């Protein structure tokens, strides 16, 4: 029996995605998102913003779609699972680890309308996915 390992994140891309193909031909797309959380400070009642950054990895057909649809600043909702990578640092021989998200489903948030002076760049068949 598998234990529960699922995460839902919503945020904006902090950089353009990177698309690669592995040696065996599997598509891989990596990107990072920033999520914001607002809350009141207890002492003075003002609001403060907490920003968290997450590295996301998409595979196969999802990776190809993400590489075509995403760009820096684009809003997304990612449903996936957490994965921890562990290794030994070759210089210090210390154990290292990093947790990242393996995307299983990505929802592309609608983009803001472009200004009338900007040319349209949508390719035929591209469709915004409603959020």
Image: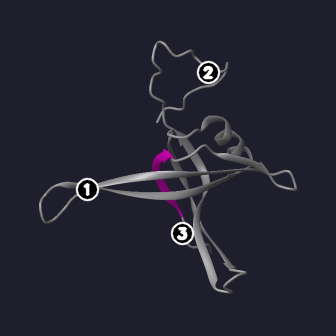
Q: Is residue 120 left or right of residue 75?
A: right
79 within the magenta span: no
How far from the left and from the top, in percent, is residue 105?
59, 48
Depth-wise, is mark 1 or mark 3 nearer the camera? 1
Residue lying furthest top in this view? 117
Residue at the image point whose x is 42% and y is 52% from the top: 35
- Which of pointers 3 and 2 indicates the residue nearer the eye? 2
CA separation, marks 1 and 3? 32 Å
Q: In the rendered structure, which disc, 1 or 3, sits on the residue that comes first in sequence? A: 3
Q: Real-space Cα distance between discs 3 and 2?
A: 39 Å
According to the image, label 2 marks what residue? 122
Q: Give the residue at x 46% y 36%.
A: 131
Kindly identify which numbered label has been placed on residue 22: none
Q: Secondary structure at mark 1?
A: strand
Q: Is residue 42 above or below residue 105?
A: below
68 over 35 or under it: above or below: above
Query: In the shown orientation, is residue 31 left or right of residue 14?
Result: right
Residue 66, percent from left and from top: 64, 42
Which residue does the numbered mark 1 point to in the structure image?
Answer: 48
Q: Which residue is mark 3?
A: 4
Spot the residue most to the bottom. 93
Who is closer to the viewer here, 118 or 105?
Answer: 118
Q: Which residues are magenta?
A: 6-13
The secondary element bearing badge 2 is classed as loop
Quadrant that contains the N terminus: bottom right
Count residues near mark 1 (Cα–Cα under 10 Å), then give few for <14, some for 14-19, many for 20+: few
């Amino acid at each position: 029996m598998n234990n529960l390992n699922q995460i839902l994140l919503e945020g904006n891309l902090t950089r353009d995605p990177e698309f690669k193909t592995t040696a065996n031909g599997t598509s891989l797309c990596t990107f990072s998102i920033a999520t914001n959380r607002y809350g009141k400070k207890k002492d003075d009642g003002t609001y403060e913003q907490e920003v968290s950054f997450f590295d996301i990895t998409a595979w196969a057909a999802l990776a190809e779609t993400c590489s075509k649809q995403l760009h820096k600043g684009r809003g997304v909702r990612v449903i996936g699972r957490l994965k921890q990578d562990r290794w030994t640092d070759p210089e210090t021989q210390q154990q290292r680890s990093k947790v990242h998200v393996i995307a299983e489903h990505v929802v592309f948030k609608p983009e803001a309308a472009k200004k009338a002076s900007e040319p349209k760049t949508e390719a035929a068949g591209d469709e915004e996915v409603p959020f």
